[in-house]
Amino acid sequence: MNNLTNMAKTSYMYQALKDFSCIGAVLPSSKFLINDIIKNINFSKVDCLVEFGAGNGCITKELLKNMQENTKLLCFETNKDFFSILKEINDKRLILINDSAENINFYLEHYCFDFADYIISSLPLVSFSKEFEGRIINCTFSSLKSGGIYIQYQYSLYSYSKFRKLYGQVKLGFTFFNIPPAFIYFCQKPPVIATAQQR
């Protein structure tokens, strides 16, 4: 493990211990967890990706590696130290936003998108107040396109029933090789079925 990797992990751990309720983990996502997230995204048919809680950019960088040239990634991170790390990523497809994820609809409109195709979230929902958690979940649903997918990982099944109630069917994944092991929720927004009059 090189010095740069050690510094990145030390920085992440320091930030996590300083503000655990907003970060929710003491180490960045493992390559196994990132791969389990990435492999479920159809990058060939994406105009707008959104990432909540990008941290030190370990998922961000993998998203950018797989994205098409004309795809944009709106990346939300409120931690100023992590945001400074993210600013070092030089990619014209990346739009960094130092604001709360609950304001996603404002930024989608600002950057001329009607909806997001995928939303990938590292937010520790279990650490939030019920009111704030509810706002995040609801604005995520409203900002997804019909048939769009919300990917959220957590270290428990805490949010499963809430996601089932809102999205209908939820596909569950599990990554053992992560610290701690993580559940991955794949929540697809039900497609709009056109009526005879609309057709």
Image: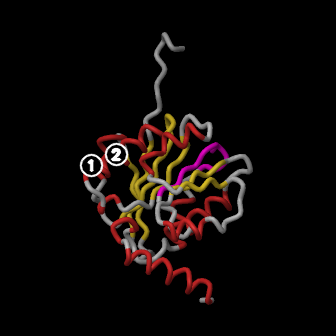
Label 2: few (<14), some (14–19) or many (≥20) C-alpha neighbours in 10 Å: some
Can you tell which mark lies on residue 135? 2
Percent position of residue 194, x then y: 49, 20
Total labels drawn? 2
Residue 50 lies in the magenta-colored region: yes
Element assignment for label 2:
helix
**In this view of the protein, which residue sits in the foreground, 142 or 77?**
77
Q: Which residues are magenta?
A: 42-52
Residue receiving disc 1:
131
> Would you say 131 lies left or right of 76 here?
left
Q: Amino acid at mark 1?
A: Glu
> Would you say 17 lies left or right of 88 here?
left
**In this view of the protein, which residue sits in the foreground, 161 or 12?**
12
Which residue is painted at 38% across and 76% down in the image?
18
Percent position of residue 123, x then y: 41, 60
Percent position of residue 129, x then y: 26, 56
